[in-house]
Amino acid sequence: MNKHIHVYPNKDKLVAATTERMVGSIEQAIQQNGLCNIALSGGNTPGGVFSLLATNPYRDRVDWGRLHLFWGDERMVSPEHQDSNFRLVKETLLDHINMPDENVHRMRGENAPELASEEYAALLDIHFGAGLPCFDLMLLGLGEDGHTASLFPGTDAVEEREKHVVAVFVPKLSAWRVTLTLPVLNAARNVFFLVSGKSKAEMVQCIMSNKQPTKEIPATMVNPQNGDLRWMLDSDAMVLINKNGREVMFPF
């Protein structure tokens, strides 16, 4: 496993750099395997990446027929709901490109949580075959409490080691979610954490100073065994660590 931190002066440069790296990963996977499988995240910063992907030159660089989109987690809402992670991708990306419908594999948040998780686990088995799904790229966000995907501190989902997809009740939100589990996240070939804003700075500082993974901060437990882990941050998210605000890259 290789770990790197990439820090950019502002959110726009973070989005641009992430988009470029994302397209590079897609091109490499297609060249090597004939297709590319990506798990997407919700949130404002990933939304900026999806919007940029839908514009040239990036749109013309991607072979959309060989790209398969999955989701890392989903809220239990309809695909048209404002809180739907699928809706974010549809409005920022899918509505602006020519991608086969059969290449878009959304979590069905309109179904009951357990049913939705079972359906998605079955979908992964069909697409990837038996064994652990191995994504070419996993996009992840970071919550102020250290959660990623819908792996929240104190929930059973953080402890799951057998199932690939689970339904999880999040007490602090009084809501159910469906999420991929840590074994799937850690099987990915490339993992990008996208983090922006000063509201994340304290948690970023905590994670960067953390010596060992801890379930109290689920994001620290994302350590792809045979892949690359890249933290893509803007200077606001790194303000408690990187004071100069210029672009930096270094392993940690």
Image: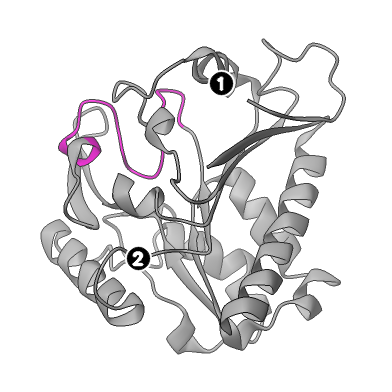
Residue at horizontal 33%, vertical 43%? 150
> SS class of the residue under badge 2?
loop
Q: Is residue 97 above or below residue 200?
A: below
How crowded is the residue under tag 1: few (<14 C-alpha within 10 Å), some, or many (20+)?
many
Would you say residue 226 is visible in this rendering?
Answer: yes
Inspect the magenta stretch and tell me whether residue 157 lies in it: yes
Inspect the magenta stretch and tell me whether residue 13 lies in it: no
The part of the chain drawn in magenta is 143-158
Q: Nearer the viewer, mark 1 or mark 2?
A: 2
Q: Mainly helix, strand or loop, the magenta region?
A: loop
Residue 25: percent from left, percent from top: 66, 63
> SS class of the residue under badge 1?
helix
Q: Is residue 246 above or below residue 181?
A: above
Residue at horizontal 19%, vertical 53%? 166
Residue 213: percent from left, percent from top: 37, 24
Residue 133 has which mark? 2
Would you say residue 111 is visible in this rendering?
Answer: no
Which residue carries the number 1 mark? 204
Residue at horizontal 64%, vertical 20%? 198
Amino acid type assigned to the residue bearing label 2 in the image? Pro
Q: Quadrant of residue 240?
A: top right
How crowded is the residue under tag 2: few (<14 C-alpha within 10 Å), some, or many (20+)?
many
Front residue of 42/203: it is 203
Residue at horizontal 43%, vertical 67%? 70
Q: Sequence order check: which comes first, mark 1 or mark 2?
A: 2
Q: Quadrant of residue 165?
A: bottom left
Amino acid type assigned to the residue bearing label 1 in the image? Val
On screen, residue 26 versus residue 127, left or right, reads: right
Q: Quadrant of residue 66?
A: bottom right
On screen, residue 223 versus residue 252, left or right, reads: left
Colouring used for the render: one colour
